[in-house]
Image (spheres, grey):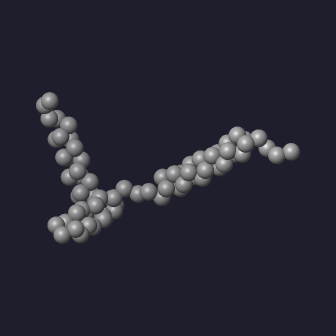
């Protein structure tokens, strides 16, 4: 006897959802913070958070966020 059509659809959607959840978990584990600088002319440079330049950029960004948060509304 053939399975009911809604069960086949449910199993297919569940399979896709499981694959998507696994992809997000893998991506979350491997993702590392970094700072990206964009220059005039379209060039971009990435700096890891544990590098000297990246550390300085993260400190500067934190200060900017702090100052922006104190703004009167």
Query: In the rendered view of the protein, which quadrant contains the C terminus?
Result: top left
> Which of 36 and 4 lies nearest the eye of the viewer?
4
The image shows residue 54, relative to residue 62, as above or below, that is below
**Residue found at x 20% / y 41%:** 66
In this picture, residue 18 sits left or right of residue 66 = right
The image shows residue 44, relative to residue 64, as above or below, that is below
**Residue found at x 16% / y 41%:** 67
Query: In the rendered view of the protein, which quadrant contains the N terminus?
Result: top right
Question: x and y percent of residue 41 in the render?
Answer: 18, 69
**Residue found at x 20% / y 37%:** 69
**Residue found at x 44% / y 57%:** 31
The image shows residue 42, relative to residue 55, as above or below, that is below
> Which of 14 and 5 lies nearest the eye of the viewer?
5
Q: In the orientation shown, which residue stands out farthest toward the left?
A: 72
Question: x and y percent of residue 71 in the render?
Answer: 14, 35
Query: Is residue 29 in view?
Result: no
Q: Quadrant of residue 4?
A: top right
In this picture, residue 66 sits left or right of residue 34 = left
Q: In the orientation shown, which residue stands out farthest toward the right?
A: 1
């Amino acid at each position: 006897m053939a399975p009911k059509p809604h069960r086949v659809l449910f199993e297919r959607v569940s399979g896709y959802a499981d694959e998507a959840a696994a992809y997000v978990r893998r991506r979350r584990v491997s993702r590392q913070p970094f700072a990206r600088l964009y220059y005039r002319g379209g060039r971009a440079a990435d700096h890891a958070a544990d590098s000297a330049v990246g550390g300085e950029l993260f400190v500067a960004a934190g200060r900017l966020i702090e100052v922006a948060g104190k703004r009167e509304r």
